[in-house]
Image: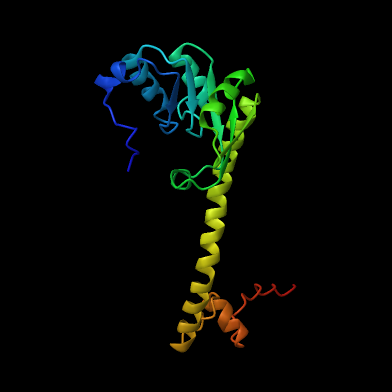
Amino acid sequence: MLPERLSVVGPEELDAAAKEIDIGVMGAHSGGARTLARIVMDGCGKLPVIVGIAKGLEPETLKPMSQVYAEEVGHERIVSVGGPCLAGEIAQGLPTAAVFASSPVATAKEAGACFRSKAFHVSVTDDLAGVEYCTVGKNVAAIGVGILDGMAKVAPGLRRAGRAGRGHGWPGGNGERPGRARRRAGHQPRRPQPPARRAAG
């Protein structure tokens, strides 16, 4: 639920809603960032500063979000936010730390001052490319960690399934292939015999 001071407006109301706007926060995913910027620019006409909270690269061009926004709004007063910042925790007022990056850094300082609070700590940097590409790498790493975490949960299940299989007489119930289990039990597969040699003479 949004605070009482905030309201939702449609594209046709953007012009009126953004008359005295100083900072525009862009939150569309990387695949829709360019479309969102065009919609907002069509409705507002101008945005003095853009704060981009979307992570990733544009799928078609592999451009970072700051470059996408700069191309659409016509200036480079773009701030990229790095986290990790979880929306639910921020909404609850839990302590959060974020990095605001821009080049030059003055834009990040200006935007960061508007967001800084006791619960939301903001540090600034002029390493815009570093922040953007690190957030991409972090998201890729998070996927990998999630896969490993899932495998850790799957492995005990496979062991339990193996024990259940042994209880029903399946020779591979210990998690091995049936052929390997039979060899362990003393059943050796027949080996192919070499062809008989021709008798001399």
Residue at 51%, 48% in the rendered image: 94
- Residue 80 is situated, as x and y percent measured from the top left of the image, at 54, 28
- Residue 176 is situated, as x and y percent measured from the top left of the image, at 55, 75
Q: In the figure, 172 relative to 28: above or below?
A: below
- Residue 196 is situated, as x and y percent measured from the top left of the image, at 66, 75
For the N terminus, give its image quadrant. Answer: top left
**Toward which corner of the image does residue 184 lie, by quadrant?**
bottom right
Residue at 50%, 12% in the rendered image: 75
Along the line of sight, which residue is nearer the eye, 151 or 36?
36
User: Looking at the image, what colour scheme do you see?
Assistant: rainbow
**Toward which corner of the image does residue 179 lie, by quadrant?**
bottom right
Q: In the figure, 73 relative to 95: above or below?
A: above
Q: In the figure, 181 relative to 59: above or below?
A: below
Along the line of sight, which residue is nearer the eye, 195 or 183?
183
State left or right for residue 154 relative to residue 10: right
Q: Farthest right residue?
A: 200
Q: How many marks?
A: 0
Residue at 42%, 32% in the rendered image: 27
For the C terminus, give its image quadrant. Answer: bottom right
State left or right for residue 17 relative to residue 189: left
- Residue 156 is situated, as x and y percent measured from the top left of the image, at 53, 73
Along the line of sight, which residue is nearer the eye, 158 or 44?
44
State left or right for residue 147 relative to residue 43: right
